[in-house]
């Protein structure tokens, strides 16, 4: 089969760092690749794009547009081999968009971010829409608001943006749903809860947290799964604690604060003397003082002889 990018190469199966993919025989002159999607027997979603996929050509610059997958998720890239010392322009694909269905029109819109929504009617400053570390947002000067849906970064209008900026700013994480109670731990007798945190879904027992495996959510995690995850986490933490040497603890008196007892033991204990040092008097010794006084005294006058 001919390569649709260069027209002269032949497509074949290749093996890369992240698995198999379809590539052109004219590589590296032609970088056309296509994901080798294998159907999931459980009916799950197809694998994420792991190799560069040529989407099309930017009509303004004439550079190719690629779909790639990086350590922080899928993204689109303008150009393949930029000049030395320069980085190609990239834009993250927000959550909610299937990377396999990203076409040239959507890729160019993402690469054109940040997008000016319009001028604020009160300040006259521009309102920008962009995608950041925590997802899509709008910006008005130093005022930021997160967008409720990922697609709003490309479609939000001026009236909607102004109304969002007029609302009070919410603390990050305040909109997260509350923890779901999974059940009681049979051995420890405490409740196990499940929720979604900053680093993904988890289960919690007191101050012990355990991440949920891929495909498991706080809504469908069972009590047996939560117990095994918590027990494994406790066992791992106990092994680390046993490997560390224990420090000597100072004994506190009844009714005395533990921290105060440790401070006393550290700072109030006098250092041990290695040897007795001779204490010299600060003043001068009487013998030396008398000798110096005698040297400074004027000589006694000579006695005159009596005439006979």
Image: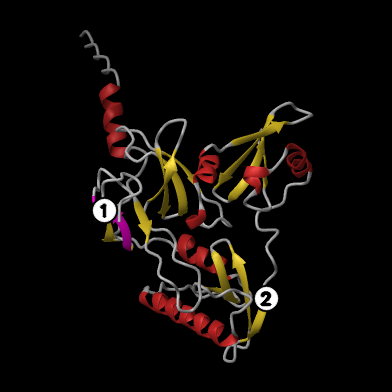
Nearer to us in this view, 151 or 58: 58
Q: Could you tell me which quadrant the C terminus lies in?
A: top left
- The percent position of residue 3, horizontal first and vertical second, equals 31, 50
Nearer to us in this view, 307 or 163: 163
Q: Find numbered disc 1 in the image and state the secondary structure of the residue it sits on.
A: loop
- The percent position of residue 299, horizontal first and vertical second, equals 26, 18
For label 2, the residue is 180
Residue count near mark 1 (Cα–Cα under 10 Å), binned few <14, some 14–19, many ≥20: some
Residue count near mark 2 (Cα–Cα under 10 Å), binned few <14, some 14–19, many ≥20: some
Return the mark for residue 10: 1
Magenta residues, as a range?
20-25
Residue 229 higher or lower than 302, as above or below: below
- The percent position of residue 283, horizontal first and vertical second, equals 37, 38
Q: Find numbered disc 2 in the image and state the secondary structure of the residue it sits on.
A: strand
Magenta span: predominant SS is: strand
Residue drawn at (24%, 14%) of the image: 302
Tell me which numbered mark, 2 or 1, is placed earlier along the sequence.
1
Nearer to us in this view, 167 or 244: 167
């Amino acid at each position: 089969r001919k390569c649709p990018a260069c027209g002269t190469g032949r497509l074949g199966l290749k093996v890369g760092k992240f698995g198999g993919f379809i590539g052109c025989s004219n590589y590296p002159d032609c970088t056309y690749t296509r994901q080798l999607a294998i159907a999931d027997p459980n009916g799950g979603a197809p694998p994420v794009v792991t190799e560069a996929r040529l989407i099309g050509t930017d009509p303004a610059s004439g550079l190719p547009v690629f779909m790639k997958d990086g350590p922080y998720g899928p993204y689109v890239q303008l150009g393949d081999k930029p000049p030395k010392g320069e980085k190609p322009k990239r834009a993250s694909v927000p959550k909610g968009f299937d990377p396999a269905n990203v076409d040239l029109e959507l890729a160019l819109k993402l690469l054109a971010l940040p997008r000016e929504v319009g001028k604020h009617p009160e300040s006259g400053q521009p309102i920008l829409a962009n995608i950041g570390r925590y997802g899509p947002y709008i910006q008005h000067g130093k005022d930021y608001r997160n967008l409720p849906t990922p697609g709003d970064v490309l479609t939000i209008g001026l009236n909607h943006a102004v109304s969002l900026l007029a609302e009070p700013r919410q603390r990050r994480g305040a909109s997260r749903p509350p923890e779901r109670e999974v059940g009681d731990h049979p051995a420890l007798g405490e409740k196990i809860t499940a929720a979604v945190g900053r680093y993904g879904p988890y289960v919690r027992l007191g101050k012990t947290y355990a991440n949920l495996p891929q495909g498991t959510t706080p809504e469908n995690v069972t009590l047996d799964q939560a117990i095994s995850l918590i027990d494994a986490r406790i066992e791992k933490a106990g092994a680390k604690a046993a490997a560390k040497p224990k420090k000597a603890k100072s004994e506190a008196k009844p009714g005395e604060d533990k921290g105060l007892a440790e401070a006393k033991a550290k700072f109030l204990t006098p250092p041990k003397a290695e040897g007795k040092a001779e204490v010299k008097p600060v003043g001068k010794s009487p013998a030396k003082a008398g000798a110096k006084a005698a040297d400074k005294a004027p000589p006694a006058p000579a006695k005159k002889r009596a005439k006979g």
